[in-house]
């Protein structure tokens, strides 16, 4: 596929037209502009789907094999406190693309509704079984508003060519990417969950894009469908991990391990192409995930919960970045960062203006890439005003009055500030307070033993809710009926 068919190679046109129309001084001016543009780093952003914080070698995982991601981490920086902006895929991606927290773009969950039994939901919220008159706040959207300025449109302001290959999940509008494909091939946008070949297709498309745009700044967003369910993988890779499991024993899933390997292979092949073309020295490569792992297929321990939860297992995700000459190798950063930070970060690197008609909630992490130890902001936030039913291995919030029934998520907000994290539950206005440095697994609720800190964080969280106009359900569900 010749992606140049879709791309406006503006600098080349500028140089050619300058030669014909304006003489030698214009040639020099255009050449200087081209040189200046090449000083800007290329950016490759690789996002895995449902890839848990522990699903990676450098975090101590002993069964899965991630040599290429581990190499990226060794060559660059690990972010130990990196967070997705939402506990599942759609809000996380909408925040990434817009630089805004969920209350500003109203994407909270795929499908736009709470999931679970209506009679177990204590509060009125948008649900799949209730009509519109039942809703007490605007239902979350299935897609990001096309009028929102996206990360791709911001990069265009810095004269970058942009491409996105892979999962989108936030609407039909592709938000200004020069090239956009769900599987790396021409055709309609489709879902490719469980496609054992799609990781290779996305990687091949990314490599082709790099080859065709090596002479100008580019932003490449590879959004893998792996490791989302259904759990499927190539037979030969699965067989390798089955043999490993037979030898070591344990309860790992060899097919899931093979999916992890497919993502890792993609990272390695992309980096190899950058090196082959001599672009690696001027390219920032980032690997991360859209939310925490699914506990019924992988382990998030010592983190609590998983995908769909505001506990650490649902929102803390791996992240490592390499940029030779800027990011010092074999380093780590403990400063909390979050998905909304990437838009302002890339805007700074592209020397592109931020959107003027929309707020940007994130903060550029460029100072951290250069070895800095802090950012200006002190707190980060999450908001999830819906219900999400529990599944195997991800039963973290008991449904009061039932026998061993659980939610993955209930209407709630959360704040992290320094070492502390507070979760505020709307059903009963209760809070949980954790010191994440002392208690990474969130087992010791300190709300009662440290009421001053709990009050401080709750006040800040409520102020943030008010500022962002976050919907906070409060009306009781008239059909709420717990069968004891």
Image (cartoon, rainbow, N blue to C red):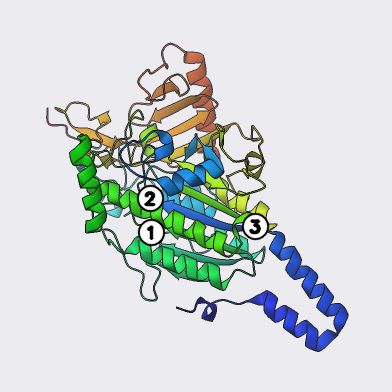
Question: Left or right of 181: which side holds 152?
Answer: right
The Cα atoms of the two marked residues, 2 and 1, are separated by 8 Å
Mark on residue 89? 2
Circles 3 and 2 in contact, beta carbons < 8 Å: no
Percent coordinates x, y for residue 296 in the rendering? 23, 40
Percent coordinates x, y for residue 204 in the rendering? 42, 67
Which residue corresponds to the image point at 28% horizontal and 40% vertical from the top-left?
Answer: 298
Percent coordinates x, y for residue 247 in the rendering? 20, 38
Q: Which residue is mark 1?
A: 169
Q: Which residue is mark 3?
A: 41
Q: As displayed, is residue 453 above or below residue 318?
A: above
Crowd band around label 1 with a 10 angstrom C-alpha radius: few (<14), some (14–19), many (20+): many
Give the position of the N terminus as an image quadrant: bottom left
Circles 2 and 1 in contact, beta carbons < 8 Å: yes
Q: Which of label 3 and label 2 is nearer to you?
A: 3
Mark 2 element type: helix
């Amino acid at each position: 596929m010749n992606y140049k068919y879709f791309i406006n190679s503006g600098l080349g046109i500028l140089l050619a037209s300058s030669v014909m129309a304006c003489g030698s001084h214009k040639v020099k001016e255009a050449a200087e502009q081209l040189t200046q543009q090449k000083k800007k780093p290329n950016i490759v952003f690789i996002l895995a789907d449902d890839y848990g914080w522990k699903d990676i070698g450098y975090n101590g995982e002993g069964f899965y094999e991630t040599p290429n991601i581990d190499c990226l981490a060794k060559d660059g920086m690990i972010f130990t406190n990196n967070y997705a902006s939402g506990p599942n895929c759609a809000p996380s991606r909408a925040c990434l693309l817009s630089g805004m927290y969920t209350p500003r773009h109203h994407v909270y969950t795929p499908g736009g509704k709470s999931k679970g039994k209506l009679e177990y939901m204590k509060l009125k919220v948008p649900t799949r079984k209730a009509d519109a008159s039942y809703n007490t706040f605007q239902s979350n959207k299935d897609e990001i508003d096309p009028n929102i300025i996206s990360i791709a449109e911001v990069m265009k302001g810095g004269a970058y060519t942009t491409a996105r290959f892979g999962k989108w999940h936030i609407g039909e509008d592709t938000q200004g990417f020069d090239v956009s494909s769900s599987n790396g091939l021409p055709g309609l946008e489709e879902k490719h969950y469980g496609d054992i070949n799609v990781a290779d297709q996305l990687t091949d498309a990314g490599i082709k894009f790099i080859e065709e745009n090596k002479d100008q700044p580019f932003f490449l967003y590879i959004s893998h469908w792996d490791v989302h369910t259904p759990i499927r993988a190539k037979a030969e890779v699965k067989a390798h991990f089955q043999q490993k499991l037979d030898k070591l024993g344990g309860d790992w899933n060899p097919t899931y391990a093979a999916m992890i390997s497919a993502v890792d292979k993609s990272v390695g092949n992309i980096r190899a192409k950058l090196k082959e073309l001599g672009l690696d020295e001027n390219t920032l490569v980032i690997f991360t995930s859209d939310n925490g792992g699914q506990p019924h297929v992988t382990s998030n321990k010592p983190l609590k919960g998983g995908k769909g939860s505001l506990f650490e297992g649902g929102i803390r995700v791996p992240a490592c970045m390499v940029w030779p000459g800027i990011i010092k190798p074999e380093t780590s950063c403990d400063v909390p960062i979050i998905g909304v930070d990437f838009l302002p970060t890339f805007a700074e690197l592209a020397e592109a203006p931020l959107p003027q008609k929309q707020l940007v909630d994130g903060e550029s992490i460029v100072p951290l890439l250069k070895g800095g130890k802090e950012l200006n902001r002190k707190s980060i936030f999450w908001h999830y005003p819906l219900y999400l039913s529990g599944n195997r291995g991800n039963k973290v919030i008991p449904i009061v009055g039932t026998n061993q029934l659980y939610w993955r998520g209930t209407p709630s907000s959360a704040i992290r500030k320094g070492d502390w994290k507070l979760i505020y539950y709307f059903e009963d206005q209760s809070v949980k307070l954790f010191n994440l440095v002392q208690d990474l697994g969130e087992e010791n609720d300190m709300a009662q033993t440290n009421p001053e800190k709990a009050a401080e964080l709750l006040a800040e969280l409520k102020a943030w809710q008010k500022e962002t106009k976050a919907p906070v359900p409060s009306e009781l569900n008239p059909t709420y009926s717990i069968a004891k």
